[in-house]
Image: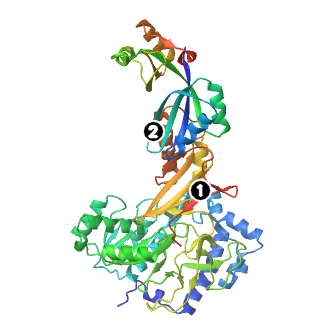
Amino acid sequence: MSVKQISVFVENQAGLLSEVTTLLADNGINLRALSIADTSDFGILRIIVEDVEKAAQILRDHGNTYTVTEVLAVKMDDKTGGLAKILKVLADAEIFLEYAYAFLLQKPGEACLIIRVPDNDAAEAALAAAGIGIAKQEDLF
Amino acid sequence: MTKYYQPEIECASREQIQQWQDERLVKQVKHVWDNVPYYRAKMEAAGVTPEDIKSTADLHKLPFITKDDLRECYPYGLLAKPLDECVRIQSTSGTTGKRVVAFYTQHDIDLWEECCARAIMAVGGDKDDVCHVSYGYGLFTGGPGLNGGSHKVGCLTLPMSSGNTERQLQFMTDLGSTILCCTPSYAAYLGESAKEMGITDKLKLKAGIFGAEAWTEEMRRDIEKSLGLKAYDIYGLTEISGPGVSFECEAQSGMHINEDHFIAEIINPETGEVLPEGEKGELVFTSITKEAFPLLRYRTRDICVLSREKCPCGRTHVKMCKPMGRSDDMLIIRGVNVFPSQIESVLLAQGFPPNYQIIVDRVNNTDTFDINVEMPPEKFTDTVREVTAMEKELVAALKAMLGIVAKVHLMAPKSIQRSEGKAVRVVDKRKLY
């Protein structure tokens, strides 16, 4: 039960990130969560949106390089130790974490951790065994 | 006092040089006709036989040889001697991954080294000199050529090869190097490094022989100042022999072509027509003494002017100016020949679109080499690890093809500059010509 994340290739040049976000904003795409990974040369903008197909279409129409990836949206308590608990489960299960980023949900006390792992099913099973739930795309909006 | 390695040749009368060229050309054409079926077929197609070539006045009747011919004939197609008479190969990078391989008999090596010996003595070198050779040794002709020339002169030869700048400077000061042979950009770098290490006043250099890449008069002054020497140019190409096809003398005003071995012509690169002496055009060489790998009318693609003005050094051989440009798209970066088509083939092989831009500049007298490459959607992934690995793989593949390292920049698709619909593939900011 993964969610779809859109990753956009962004050159490391002034104004280029703003170009992408402006493009999405102008087309009414609201970003629920985002993270930016950067090197000295390029960056990768990762976003979670409600209408993935529409956002992808807009990016494609404007010649952007992007990819859609299945990631896990792990339900997290908005309190001390919330993140540590999830990471401990993954570490104990020896699941390699490529990257992660967190954001708060609308409902007070609820947060979400987006994780990118090699095997979504294995991670989901390990988390479920520890009583940690996984959110669906629509749960995030 | 002007010094010569072979004064009877270097200062021979024009009539004598002409006679050598006529005799040797006739002999060479016969040698090639008899031993190189590929070129013989070219001559037959052009309706020329060895009997038609009676002197240099008939040279224009012969067909040209180009880099494409060399590529097509790789490796043995232009060999004119049995392999058991050959003792060496040297090589240069060529397009589409195929190298150009040149063969030498012992006699060829001797003559080549004599040409380099002439170059060393022309800058004042003699047997009491310490000749520091920092050209690369190996397939590249720079190191072996000047090394051999230095031996012939009788200098104490330091076969340093390139790299390890600290050790270069240490030997230079400890052993008192007096003549430096390397690329001009490396000479400039050595000068900078000597300054940083505070050892400039310990250097005993008096002359430098710098070639294998284009350099300006401004760069000459910089190097002369930083290393405290007189800087001289040398020209050559592996196809013809290597460095020493021509060399600068004390006059520092053009390079004397060793006309007893090489006949130079200037042609119109568009039509192939021979231009009158003194006009600007593409330089074409015929090697008239080479045994193993004799090339008749090889098109260098270098744009040049020849001059027969009397030289104060006393040498009578024709002078060529520094090449003023290319009639093809070859770039010389850090002394290495780079064709945009090579980069294109690597990109395609690695799954990148062939839309790229090469940016060459010279910063602190050293060439910088950047390639902007478009990131195709098919290859893009969401992890930095994978994209960086892709970039590294591309850099390694480019290095394997070109022999030098390029800095690769991944760009968004369609972001690479196009002018009037046509992409600008090369931006050379060096202003060398």
Which of these two is toward me, B180 or A96?
A: A96
Residue found at x 60% / y 75%: B283
Which of the labelled discs sits on residue B340, or is there none? 1
The residue type indicated by label 2 comes to: Asp
Crowd class of label 1 (few under 14; some 14 to 19; many from 20; radius 10 Å): some
Callouts 1 and 2 on one subunit: no
Residue B236 visible in the picture: yes
Left or right: residue B175 versus residue A51 is left
Where B353 sits versus A59, above or below?
below
Where A107 sits versus B119, above or below?
above
Place of residue B71 in the rendered image (x, y in percent of width and height, measured from the top left) = 62, 58
User: In the rendered view of the protein, which quadrant contains the C terminus of chain B?
Assistant: bottom right
Left or right: residue B183 versus residue B201 is right
Place of residue B323 in the rendered image (x, y in percent of width and height, measured from the top left) = 54, 74
What colour-coding does the image apply?
rainbow
Where A54 sits versus B1, above or below?
above
Where B196 sits versus B349, above or below?
below
User: In the rendered view of the protein, which quadrant contains the N terminus of chain B?
Assistant: bottom left
Place of residue B391 in the rendered image (x, y in percent of width and height, measured from the top left) = 50, 42
Which chain letter matches label 1? Answer: B
Q: Which residue is mark 2?
A: A38
Left or right: residue B337 versus residue B171 is right
The residue type indicated by label 1 comes to: Pro
Which chain letter matches label 2? Answer: A
